[in-house]
Image (cartoon, helix red, strand yellow):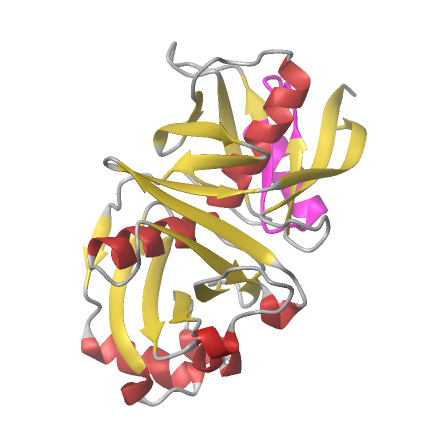
Amino acid sequence: MPTFPFQQVDVFSLEPMRGNPLAVVFGADSLSDSQMQAFANWTNLSETTFLLKPTDPRAHYRVRIFTPTQELPFAGHPTLGSAHVWLSNSGISPDGDIVQECGAGLVRIRRDGTRLAFAAPPLTRSGPVDPALVERIAEALGLTMDRIEGSNWLVNGPDWIGLRLSSREDVLAVKPDYPMLNGARVGLVGVIGRSTEPAEGEHVDFEVRAFTKNGYEDPVTGSLNAGMAQWLIGSGIAPDSYVAAQGTVLGRKGRVFVDKVGDDIWIGGEVAACVSGTVTI
């Protein structure tokens, strides 16, 4: 059985092992779809990625992204983690943007100091959510409707439904009933006021939580934050640059750095290698 370079990295945290983990297999061109899915099922992480040679000449590499049960066309923390592993294993250091090929097309990634950031892909569905669906989700989250200040579809691969709540405290207090959510992917965002700003002198503007359709809370979610940024900045609720916290309830310390530059919105974060070696598949 062949062996492949392998890394498990932590994404979107200044402190290793307090972000969102990702397993990455490098040079996986010989693996079949079923082998990739089986390995992703075995790692049992939210996502496992496989780096391959690109089919588009404009791309530096191609990535396939698997959850334990299915393949995704795009996801955010796998994009940054995969770029980190590609840079550390390929021996290539592009002068400009790194270009990733994935199921959603080409995604640009840039280096921003010690962080990596990807350009948020276009939303394939946006706009307000049907009020009846919002009411069902509110009931599943134990929220009264007066706590919800807005809703929006945020589909950029994963079919996120975004809800904007009155405050960070409201976001952190939610206890989801997953059977009642009935498979909906729901993201929450609430503003952090000066009186509730996290300690240690850091600046954080929004608190985010993400509830997956598989019945668990995701620690830090790039695709959701990309959609949230397009919604919040586009509607004038958020400034062109801000920082979002995520994973607080789970004991994580996710930090997502958002910057609008021209027509692009960049979603950035730290990536740290926690496990390196080879894997036999």
- Residue located 46% across and 55% down the image: 243
280 sits to left or right of 141? right
Q: Is residue 57 magenta?
A: no
Please tell me which residue lies in front, 172 or 261.
261
Please give the range of residues in magenta.
Answer: 25-50
| Placement of 104 over or under 125, stated as above or below | above
Q: Does the magenta stretch include residue 30?
A: yes
- Residue located 26% across and 69% down the image: 151
218 sits to left or right of 233? right
137 sits to left or right of 22? left
Q: Tally the marks.
A: 0
- Determine the image quadrant of residue 115: top right
- Residue located 62% across and 17% down the image: 30
Please tell me which residue lies in front, 169 or 205.
205
1 sits to left or right of 161? right
Residue 190 is situated, as x and y percent measured from the top left of the image, at 40, 71
| Placement of 245 over or under 141, stated as above or below | above
Please tell me which residue lies in front, 125 or 183.
125
Please tell me which residue lies in front, 265 or 10.
265
| Placement of 261 over or under 195, stated as above or below | above
- Determine the image quadrant of residue 138: bottom left
Residue 241 is situated, as x and y percent measured from the top left of the image, at 37, 49
Residue 77 is situated, as x and y percent measured from the top left of the image, at 53, 44
| Placement of 26 over or under 219, stated as above or below | above
Q: Which quadrant holds the C terminus?
A: top right
Q: Does any portion of residue 228 appear in the rendered image?
A: yes
